[in-house]
Amino acid sequence: MVVAMIVACEVGFWVLIALGLLSRYVLHRRRLSNVFLYATPLLEVILLVVAVVDLRGGATAGSRHGIAALYIGTTAVFGHRAIRWVDQRVGYHFLGGPLPWRPPRRGPERVRYEVVEFARAVAAMAIAGALLGVLILITGDADRTEALRGFFGVLGGFTLICLVIGVYGVCEAFGKPPKDKPAPRRLREPGPVERTPVG
């Protein structure tokens, strides 16, 4: 049941995005678009409830519960960025809008970008770890939650991979710059108040 819900939530996430963008750009119904796009976090809540019910019903925790926690953590931190990524490209390719925002390639701006991205990855893993702890406490049975305790190592592995990617990006920031080209007009990166594409 948990595995099926993970798949359903992932499919539902992109379906809601598609419906939101369709409402916004084709039907020109901004309020309806907001309803679809702001509904995406509800999928995380549903998945968490399903995982809790499964464990409270006597199921032995497995990798499926750990993956559910990892999915919720990454979606909570990076979900709005995925929506914005799709939104910018739909606006560019179908409505003649400006080129989508792209991360800086060189200099201190690239370093700052990599640091912020790594901090987001750490936050996602921290949320996933907290959810694992909650599931362990709710189950209250050390034998049935052994797999969940082992999943903390998986979260640490993901964090290490993100660190390596970040270090590589920082090194690349001070590499040989490409030949100068006219900079196309792009969207600027939204600030903290502009994280959603429907504002």
Image: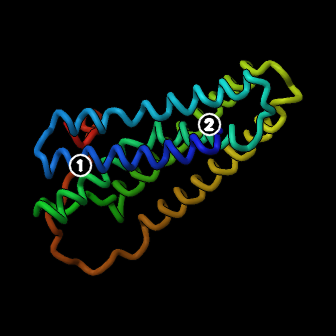
Q: Residue at x 30, y 54 (%)?
A: 86
Residue carrying label 2: 69
The N terminus is located in which quarter?
top right
- Give amino acid for label 1: Leu
Find numbered disc 2 in the image and state the secondary structure of the residue it sits on.
helix
Q: Residue at x 55, y 48 (%)?
A: 7
Give the mark nearest the N terminus, 1 or 2: 1
Find numbered disc 1 in the image and state the secondary structure of the residue it sits on.
helix
Question: How far across and down, in percent of the image, does residue 188 sit?
Answer: 21, 51
Mark 1 and 2 residues: CB-CB less than 8 Å, in contact? no
Nearer to me, 165 or 13: 13
Q: Hey, which quadrant is residue 183 in on the image?
A: bottom left
- Give amino acid for label 2: Ala
Q: Residue at x 19, y 55 (%)?
A: 187
Residue carrying label 1: 21
Nearer to me, 27 or 41: 27
Question: How far across and down, in percent of the image, does residue 149 sit?
Answer: 79, 34
Nearer to me, 142 or 3: 3
Coloration of the structure image: rainbow
Between the C-alphas of marks 1 and 2, the distance is 28 Å
Q: Hey, which quadrant is residue 61 in on the image?
A: top right
Question: How far across and down, in percent of the image, does residue 60 sit?
Answer: 81, 33
Closer to viewer: mark 1 or mark 2 = 1
